[in-house]
Amino acid sequence: MDERIDPQKAEEVIREAVRLQQEHAEGIPKQVLEASAQEIGVDPKFLHEALRRVEQERTKRAQRIRIVLVALGVVMVLALFNLLYAHSVLNRAWSEVQARQRQLQNVQERQQSIVPRLEALIRQVDQTQKERLQMLARALQNDPAQATALATQLLADPSLRNDWALVRLMDEIVGSENRIAVERKRYNEAVARYERIARQFPINLARPLLGYPAKVDK
């Protein structure tokens, strides 16, 4: 009487046979597998169906792996492209901020360079003019906007119009404040433009990796 093997044990045997086949360098011939299955009482049609399902599952698994690898490749390419693009855009905007900042500092320093010349002029004028010019010198160091207003008033004084050196200095003070206002406006616009770019998606994802700040310290 033929020995009967329960289905659970048969499944374990088949799994072990498949594992041995995977470990074997040359594999197990299909005829051998069919013969082995027949010996343990496995119907050939179930064996063929099992083979089909195993091959189908392997094919699906290989396809999923390929899809994942392709997706990862696409993500990496997009991330690299974003890094390069973000660096280009941020670098250009940041360079403009720095250039505008240097220009603003330059005109401010030029305005402050007027102070020694104004102090030298104070020593050459009479007492009435000296008090007004001293007030102007203090304003120039502490409140340039007020200095511009005082310089404008001095330019309108008929008694000072014949003093060529004084008139020229007042013109420089008024002009310097106007230049500072223009350069400050350009600097603020450059800062606003940079911060707007730094917030944009997907640049904001790459920005921390590139070391650019989210905001400009004024």
Image (tube, rainbow, N blue to C red):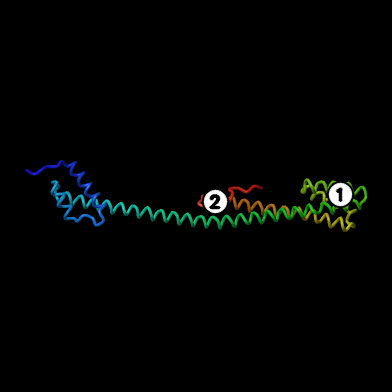
Q: Nearer the viewer, mark 1 or mark 2?
A: 2
Residue closer to the observer: 197 or 158: 197
Name the residue type under label 2.
Answer: Arg
Along the polypeptide, which appears first: circle 1 or circle 2? 1
The residue at which mark 1 appears reads as 133
Q: Which of the 4 image quadrants contains residue 31?
A: bottom left
Q: Residue at x 14, y 52 (%)?
A: 35
Q: Position of residue 196 (x, y in %)?
A: 57, 51
Dot 1, how many residues are within 10 Å of its Cα: few (below 14), some (14-19), or many (20+)? many
- Helix, strand or loop status at disc 1: helix
- Left or right of 121, for residue 35: left
Residue closer to the observer: 68 or 5: 5
Q: Which mark is residue 207?
A: 2
Q: Residue at x 14, y 46 (%)?
A: 40
Q: Residue at x 92, y 48 (%)?
A: 127
Residue closer to the observer: 200 or 51: 51
Q: Position of residue 14 (x, y in %)?
A: 20, 47
Name the residue type under label 1.
Answer: Leu
- Label tally: 2
Q: Quadrant of the N terminus?
A: top left
Q: Residue at x 36, y 54 (%)?
A: 67
Direction left: furthest residue: 1
